[in-house]
Image (spheres, rainbow, N blue to C red):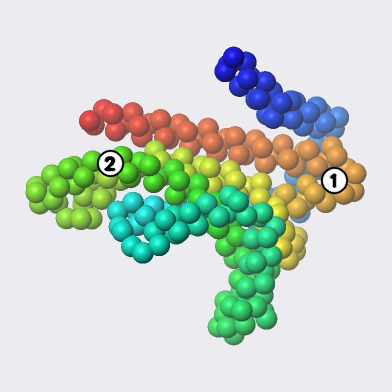
Amino acid sequence: MSLGFTLVYLCLLVVIPLIALFTKASSLTLQQFIAAAWTERVRAAYFVTFSSSLIAAIADTILGLMLAWVLVRYDFPFKRLFDSLVDLPFALPTAVAGLVYSSLYAHNGWMGQFLLPLGIKLAYSQSAIILVLTFIGLPFVVRTVQPVLESLDADVEEAAACLGASRWQTFTRVLLPSLYPALITGFALTFARAIGEYGSVVFVSSNVPGKTQIAPFLIIQRLEEFKYAEATAVAIVLLIASFAMLIVINALERRTQAANSAAN
């Protein structure tokens, strides 16, 4: 029963939409596919999308590790409240997040009016895109790393301290190898989530081609023009790139786990 339910679930939500996507794109010839998915404007949108997603994923990996460490290792007032706020991006509509950030960091916003005179532009720029992508993806890293930190035995750290290791050496040589798989998984989830993000980015991006225009916006634009095959061509490029990144990261994760098992 469980296997059957899983297969039906995968077919309805994953396999059938993917088949429909490739079927629609197959109506294009190779030259038409390249013309739709590999123009100068589209390549610039790919660059903005992947570079912003990569920077946001790296930032989330660092910030998520720090936040998970604080939530697991320290007790402080309103700890449960802050722990629950980590999941806010999951519950909050991404469009609302985009509206909030645009109102905060616009030139006349609460914070933007003070940052803009300093030369810091956090609205309608690529920095704004990275900022909202970081907000959207942070819970993936925290919720992936947090259970691993909770399961680590404190005796291992005490043993390292007794052997003369500093706190930095204990973290980098004892704790971090155990955290690598969770960090890689969190990074992969954040990166894959950021590539397809549209709702929050559209409110903080000026959508200038070659500068702040993202690939999902081009897909929506093609759909509004009733150019469904061209839209699926761009979507397929994003899909293939996401799958390739996930395969590489999963391979690295398995390699890290095998190295840790051999070391233990």
Q: Residue at x 50, y 57 (%)?
A: 85
Q: Residues within 10 Å of mark 1 (few under 14, many from 20)?
A: some
| Residue at mark 2 | 152
- The quadrant of the rendering that contains the C terminus is top left
Give me the disc on residue 253. none
| Residue at mark 1 | 223
Which residue type carries mark 1?
Leu
Q: Residue at x 75, y 53 (%)?
A: 217
- Residue 113: percent from the left, percent from the top? 62, 82
Which residue type carries mark 2?
Leu
Q: Residue at x 55, y 55 (%)?
A: 88
Using the rendered image of the protein, determine whether residue 181 is visible from the camera's viewpoint: yes
- Residue 68: percent from the left, percent from the top? 39, 52
- The quadrant of the rendering that contains the N terminus is top right
Using the rendered image of the protein, determine whether residue 130 is visible from the camera's viewpoint: no
Q: Which residue is more in the foreground, 230 or 64?
A: 64
Task: Determine the image quadrant of residue 15.
Answer: top right
In the depicted structure, whether residue 29 falls above or below residue 212: above
Task: Determine the image quadrant of residue 246.
Answer: top right
| In this view, the mark in front (2 or 1) | 2
In the depicted structure, whether residue 81 falls above or below residue 114: above
Q: Secondary structure at mark 1?
A: helix
Q: Secondary structure at mark 2?
A: loop
Q: Are marks 2 and 1 in contact (CB under 8 Å)?
A: no
- Residue 121: percent from the left, percent from the top? 61, 74
